[in-house]
Image: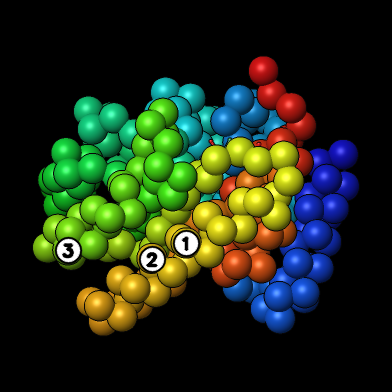
Amino acid sequence: MACERLKEVEERIRLACERAGRKREEVLLLGASKGVPPERLREFFNCGLSTFGENRVQEFLKKWESLRDLPINWHFIGRLQSNKVKYIIDKVNLIHSLDRDSLLEEIERRAKAIGKVQGVLIEVNVGGEETKGGVEPKELKAFFERCLKAENIKVLGLMCIPPYRENPQEVRPYFSLLRRLKEELEGEFGVPLPHLSMGMSHDFEVAIEEGATIVRIGTLLFGERP
Ligand SMILES: *Cc1c(COP(=O)(O)O)cnc(C)c1O
């Protein structure tokens, strides 16, 4: 069951890469595993999926504990409260949701304390939605400049959760905006930003066509969750 689903998603990623003239290895499949019990993650791991992204710190810590025997590449993809950074800093390879100064300062402080350089993505509010996290596009440059000063943080790219549209083609402009913002930062500051984390179950193919390097897929792999 798990292996079947993974194979189907893999196939669709492969086709999207082909259409876009990209190599399959350029796109990392991340299982967005909120609400999914650890035993299921283990099944998927055994089928070949090794990157998982969690949204909630308490839930993540429980799963991390029960799956410590597996070499999982853990990412944190949800909204992150500054006071919870200390619990995850030694456990995650990438934080996708850096979006404000208080969080920047806390990650820097905690990473320094354990002698780590923490990889992060800056989340951008591409739809200008009030209910969503993320840096506003017009504030991105200044925020990025402050990130560059943090010695124990390495910004590896940008992430977005665009507005939901029934027709995934209508999400395309938000994905291309994120790519443009990334390219502007690279040009202006002369630093490579290898990652664009964008695309979920219903729009990942469009995201791949627009340059996604990490697609975060939940429902398609794990089914509907409560
Ligand atoms: C849940 C979640 C996803 C996956 O969404 P699906 O539509 O279930 O694929 C991706 N990114 C984030 C930040 C999420 O919270």
Secondary element at tag 2: helix
For the C terminus, which image quadrant? top right
Seen from the viewer's position, the closer of residues 106 and 182 is 182
Q: Give ligand 1's quarter of the image.
A: top right
Q: Is the residue under label 2 in contact with that under label 1 (CB below 8 Å)? A: yes
Residue 46 seen in render: no
Ranked by sequence position, the earlier of labels 2 and 3 is: 3
Seen from the viewer's position, the closer of residues 86 and 135 is 135
Secondary element at tag 1: helix
Give the numbered dot on residue 145. Answer: 3
- The picture places residue 188, in percent across and down from the top left corner, at 25, 78
Residue under numbered circle 2: 181
Tell me what residue is drawn at x 34 percent, y 73 percent.
184
How many C-alpha atoms fall within 10 Å of the one at disc 2: few (<14), some, or many (≥20)? many
How much space separates mark 3 and mark 1, taking CA atoms? 19 Å
For the N terminus, which image quadrant? top right
How much space separates mark 2 and mark 3, taking CA atoms? 14 Å
Q: Is residue 31 left or right of residue 90?
A: right
Indicate which label's residue lies in the foreground, 2 or 3: 2
Q: What's the amino acid at mark 1?
A: Leu
Seen from the viewer's position, the closer of residues 200 and 67 is 200
Q: Is residue 223 above or below residue 52?
A: above
- The picture places residue 112, in percent across and down from the top left corner, at 14, 52
